[in-house]
Amino acid sequence: MTAMRNRVRLGVNIDHVATIRNARGGTHPRPLRAAHMAANAGADGLTIHLREDRRHISDEDVRQMVQDVKLPINLEMAATSEMLNIALRHKPHAACIVPERRQEVTTEGGLDVAGNQDYLKAYVAALQEAGIRVSLFIDPDPEQLEAAHAVNAPVVELHCGQYCEAALALTDTGLGGPLVEFELTRLKNAAALCNALDLECHAGHGLTFDTVSDVAAIPNIAELNIGHFLIGEAIFIGFEAAIHKMRTLIDKATQS
C-alpha cells in the first residue's frame, strides 16, 4: 500500500502588492491586508523579498508582517551583512537566500552556492543559531545541491523559471515540447537528489495555473512559493479566488 503524500504547502509572495503601492506612494494597497487575505484563502505561509533598493517590500512591511501575521513569514534576502542584521532583529520563521542584482527586474537565476561555500556556511549558521529556518534558492543542478548540503542548509528552493518559460513558449508557439520535458526532468531529478541528501525541497518562480500541477506532482517537493502570477491574476478574478484556485490545483496534482 502506497503511503499518502503530505500536503504540499503553498507560500504566497505578496511583494507586488507593495510594488503597486509604491508606484503612487502612500499606503494603498496595504501588503498587510493582502497577507491576511492570503491566510483566509488557504495560503500556508507568506513570502516577502526585502531588496537592497527597497523597490517593493519595505523595512516597515517586514516589521508588521512578523509582528501581526500568524502565518509563517519567509523573508527572501541577499546574503549581505545588512540583511543578516535585519533578519536577526525581526526573526522571521524562515529566510530564503537569493542572488540579487540591482538592475534585474526579478530574480534571474539560482544562487551560486558552489562558488561561495565558505561565506554561505557561516551565513547559514548565523541564521540557524537564531532559530530561523534557512533555504537556498538554487537552480536544479546537482553541483549546487551538493554544495547546499555542504554548507548545512536544511532546505533548498528549486528555481522553476526555465521550465515555466519553456512551457509558456510551447503554449504560445506550439514548439519546444522536448525542452519542456527536459526542464521538468531536471526538476524531478533535483528533487530526488534532495531526498538523497536529506534536504527539504521547495520550488518556485514563474509558476502559473498551467505549470503548477506538473511541478506539484513531483515527489519530495514540500512547498511551492508563488507570487507575481497570483497578484496579476487578482486583477481578473480577485486575490482570494486566485489563491484558492492555485491551492485546488496543487491539491489535485498531489492526490492523483
Image (cartoon, rainbow, N blue to C red):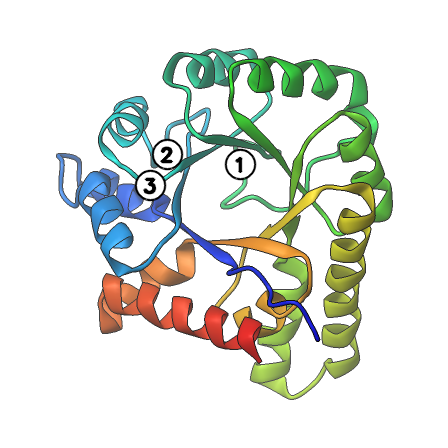
Q: Earlier in the sequence, mark 2 or mark 3?
A: 2
In the rendered image, the vertical position of residue 104 relative to residue 221, given as above or below: above
The front one of 169 and 180 is 180
- Judging by the rendered image, the residue that carries numbered circle 1 is 103
Q: Earlier in the sequence, mark 1 or mark 2?
A: 2
Residue 95 appears at what percent x and percent y?
A: 51, 30
Residue 84 appears at what percent x and percent y?
A: 52, 15
Which quadrant of the figure contains the N terminus? Answer: bottom right
- How many numbered discs? 3
- Label 1: element kind: loop
In the rendered image, the vertical position of residue 69 relative to residue 251, given as above or below: above
- Label 2: element kind: loop
Which quadrant of the figure contains the C terminus? Answer: bottom right
Q: Which mark is residue 71?
A: 3
User: Which corner quadrant of the image does residue 229 belong to?
Assistant: bottom left
Label 3 Cα neighbours within 10 Å, binned few <14 / some 14-19 / many ≥20: some
- Which amino acid, mark 1? Gln
- Which amino acid, mark 2? Arg
User: Which corner quadrant of the image does residue 192 belong to?
Assistant: bottom right
In the rendered image, the vertical position of residue 10 relative to residue 23, given as above or below: below
In the rendered image, the vertical position of residue 119 relative to residue 225, given as above or below: above
Q: Which mark is residue 55?
A: 2
Residue 125 visible within the image:
yes
- Which amino acid, mark 3? Leu
Q: In whole angstroms, how far apart are the C-alphas of marks 1 and 3?
A: 31 Å
- Label 3: element kind: loop
Label 2 Cα neighbours within 10 Å, binned few <14 / some 14-19 / many ≥20: some
Residue at screen point 80% across, 70% down: 182
Q: Are marks 1 and 2 in contact (CB under 8 Å)?
A: no
Q: In whole angstroms, how far apart are the C-alphas of marks 2 and 3?
A: 24 Å
Q: In whole angstroms, how far apart are the C-alphas of marks 1 and 2?
A: 11 Å
Q: Are marks 2 and 3 in contact (CB under 8 Å)?
A: no
